[in-house]
Image (cartoon, rainbow, N blue to C red):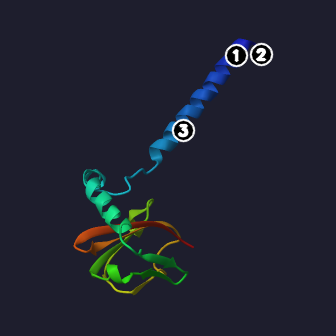
Amino acid sequence: MSWGKGIIIGMGLFMGFIITLVVIMMRQNIDLVQEDYYQKELDYDKQYNAETNYLSAKDSIRVALSSEELSLYFPEEFQTGKASVQLIRPNDKKMDLILSLEAKENVRIPVKQLAKGRFNCTVSGFHNGKPYEMNQILIVK
């Protein structure tokens, strides 16, 4: 075989490889993590201030995950009424769980309904009249 045929075969194989990659990439479902992503970017200052308010508190919210339940321990200074818990699944928004609950000392949420995998847990509410937000990554096994 001459070197010319080898170059033509090599170029053909390379073009086939590139076309295969393009077809595979076009079939992938690529969604934003959240539908209102751009609005959240515009509201980033509010989120940053809420996280700063949480970090400036004396005590912190503790999160414990077992095979049966998700336990949230609110210290006395965060027991100020309503709180919101968001369990966001980064790769599938159908598995997201958003709860509104009463911020009392010990809150238990059953996790049998959650699929195994990674969740971004966000606990938010008001502390001393200011919003707070705590973020943590949870892995359900």
Whole-Å distance between the Cαs marked 1 and 2? Answer: 7 Å
Q: Foreground mark, 1 or 3?
A: 3
Q: Residues within 10 Å of mark 2 (few under 14, many from 20)?
A: few
Q: Earlier in the sequence, mark 1 or mark 3?
A: 1
Q: Amino acid at mark 3?
A: Leu
User: Are the two marked residues, 1 and 3, in contact with CB atoms closer than 8 angstroms?
Assistant: no
Gap in Å between the C-alphas at discs 2 and 3?
29 Å
Question: Is the residue 7 above or below the residue 21 in the image?
Answer: above
Q: Given the image, on which type of amino acid does mark 2 rest?
A: Met
**Residue 88 visible in the snapshot:** no
Looking at numbered disc 1 in the image, what kind of residue is underneath it? Lys
CB under 8 Å between discs 1 and 2? yes
Q: In this rendering, would 47 be left or right of 129?
A: right
Q: Could you say which quadrant of the image residue 81 lies in?
A: bottom left
Residue indicated by mark 1: 5
Q: Label 3 belongs to which residue?
A: 21
Percent of width and height locating residue 62: 45, 77
The residue labelled by disc 2 is 1
Residue 104 at what x, y percent from top left? 35, 86
